Image: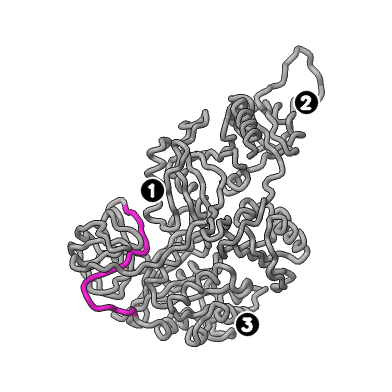
Amino acid sequence: MKLRNVAIIAHVDHGKTTLVDRLLQQSGTFRENQRVAERAMDSNDLERERGITILAKATSIVWKDTRINIVDTPGHADFGGEVERILNMVDGAIVLVDAAEGPLPQTKFVVSKALKIGLKPIVAINKVDRPDGRPDVVASEVFDLFAALDATEEQLDFPVLYGSAKEGWMAPALEGPKESMAPLLDLVLKHVPEPKIEHGPFRMLGTILESNPYLGRIVTGRITSGSLAPNQPAKVLDRNGKIVETGRISKVLAFRGLERQPIDEAVAGDIVSVAGLPEATVAHTICAPEVSEPLPAQPIDPPTLSMTFRVNDSPLAGTEGDKVTSRMIRDRLLREAEGNVALKVTESTEKDSMEVAGRGELQLGILIETMRREGYELSVSRPKVLFQRDEATGEIREPIEEVVIDVDEQFSGVVVQKMSERKSELIEMRPSGGGRTRLVFYAPTRGLIGYQGELLTDTRGTAIMNRLFHEYAPYKGEVQGRRTGVLISTDAGEAVAYALWNLEDRGPMMIEPGWKVYMGMIVGEHTRENDLEVNVLKGKKLTNIRTTSKDEAVRLTPPIRMTLEKALAYIQDDELVEVTPKSIRLRKKLLDPNERKKEERRKVSEGV
């Protein structure tokens, strides 16, 4: 059977996963009466809840006696490590662009990677049914983007389709015909070349890794040369050609619609999953025993943020989760690093803690969220930016990101002011249709930690921020952090409504009556700059005098709800977020007030 391998790449929320749904339906993969969840490719709970793709996944359809392997990729820059590897195993890419938003930073990032490898993309302009859509303008913006990324003449001669994945049609012209996805599938057959097949024994580069409770570790990749059958002996080489392990392939699985089915033989050019090699991972070459040269693997962009994951040592430790020891946390993080090449896990200098470096807050936040759902308890520090030192001049360099903010015109002033306070420089400012302005900044990653929430407050929830790593540049100087102090509990017990009511003028609370608190736990935000220790356990003194006044009915202002991402952005360097399967609490690193005072004196004496 003839083969085509194609990836769908786009910015977040431009409709990649919905497009795959429609292609599966169009090709008759589903039965007439089969119930299929919307966005069928987003298989894990977190992806469904957030409506984003986190892990790249492959599927395959048959169209006009050709099998098309389709890879759905994540749209967030934080998961860019997945996209970079996937482009190596396909021969074509469908670049999906929103008809209203146009090409955004992540589109630019993945398109630049695709063009560098030499792929000739197909451009599909999606969501043309949006009332604020401007498909013609967007088509010329995409052309300008390709030209700016040094595309070759051939790559610039890309075919364009217009359509709406939600409504289930694509067509070469805006007018239609608005019937089906067939024009896109026909274009894939015509425009995407057949897989390049090399001669020689079996070789394949691992690109996606997952674990299965029955089959163990499963590695997915494209077979470069030779063929593969179950029970065949194989060896695994790392990037430098060292042998990692030798063994036998226990199962060869091929993608058939949403299912993976065992097959008796896989041939060069096909994308398959293999089981039976417990040590093989991403960027390793799985090959026949006689091969000695590994396949070249793409280098992955370096991580820009790091966090310390430590054992939860608060007084409430172990009451809500069952995986609490440092050994369990360490093993889980090392297991994650094996499959996720954009993460680096190292031993920290502090005891019982690990240093985890990644691409961004979202990527690290998703890792913590996944761990807490598995029953882990841990405490994490504030994200720190990874600096580099220039060996020639000795100056410190820091990561700079390209930030694109789409905002209503009336709020653009406040956004520019807040971004300049965070040491950003404004690169471009232009109208983007519908009374909105597009602002492009180069901003240090340090200044962006925790800005998302503030931006939504400043713009009444109307702004959309997209960011992407740009380069390392000289250190920009101090960036002002949170301006207010916090309210810290002085004692352990359960919070009392009367005490919280009396403390309301000190600042907004983060806890509710009846919640368990302990000494050193953060219970609210102070209205001033300093931290304040408060007693939230103090009940009302009862006397035998009765009054008719209303003081029995204590009415409290609703507390600030802290989500995981919000908490990570909120804390300072001397604070931690305590994460358990049921709660997210904020606390001081040193719980004892005397210890905190000692630490402050030490810092003053050392002039830190």
Give the class, few, some or many, for how many residues have Cα within 10 Å of label 3's Cα (few <14, many ≥20).
few
Q: Which of 485 and 505 is in front in this view?
A: 485
For residue 464, side relative to residue 184 (left or right): right
The magenta stretch is 195-212
Q: Circle 2 is placed at which residue position? A: 551
The N terminus: image quadrant:
bottom left
Mark 1 near mark 3, Cβ–Cβ under 8 Å? no
Q: Which amino acid does label 2 sit on?
A: Asp
Q: For residue 334, which numbered disc appears in the image?
A: 1
Label 3 element class? helix
Where residue 32 sits in the image (x, y, percent)? 40, 70
2 over 86 or under it: above or below:
below
2 vs 3, front mark: 3
Q: Taking the image as drawn, is residue 38 in sight?
A: no
Please say whether residue 202 is one of the residues in the magenta stretch.
Answer: yes
256 over 48 or under it: above or below:
below
Where residue 387 sits in the image (x, y, percent)? 55, 54
Q: For residue 71, which numbered disc appears in the image?
A: none
Label 2 element class? helix
1 vs 3, front mark: 1
Q: Which of 138 and 387 is in front in this view?
A: 387
The C terminus: image quadrant:
top right
Q: Which of 228 and 310 is in front in this view?
A: 310
What's the distance in space between the residues labelled 1 and 3, CA to CA? Answer: 48 Å
Mark 2 near mark 3, Cβ–Cβ under 8 Å? no
Q: What residue type is labelled 3?
A: Asp
Report the label total: 3
Q: Earlier in the sequence, mark 1 or mark 3?
A: 3
Q: Which residue does the image show at 47% across and 38% down from the upper left?
A: 350
Where residue 190 sits in the image (x, y, percent)? 41, 86
For residue 60, side relative to residue 304 (left or right): left
Give the class, few, some or many, for how many residues have Cα within 10 Å of label 1's Cα (few <14, many ≥20).
some
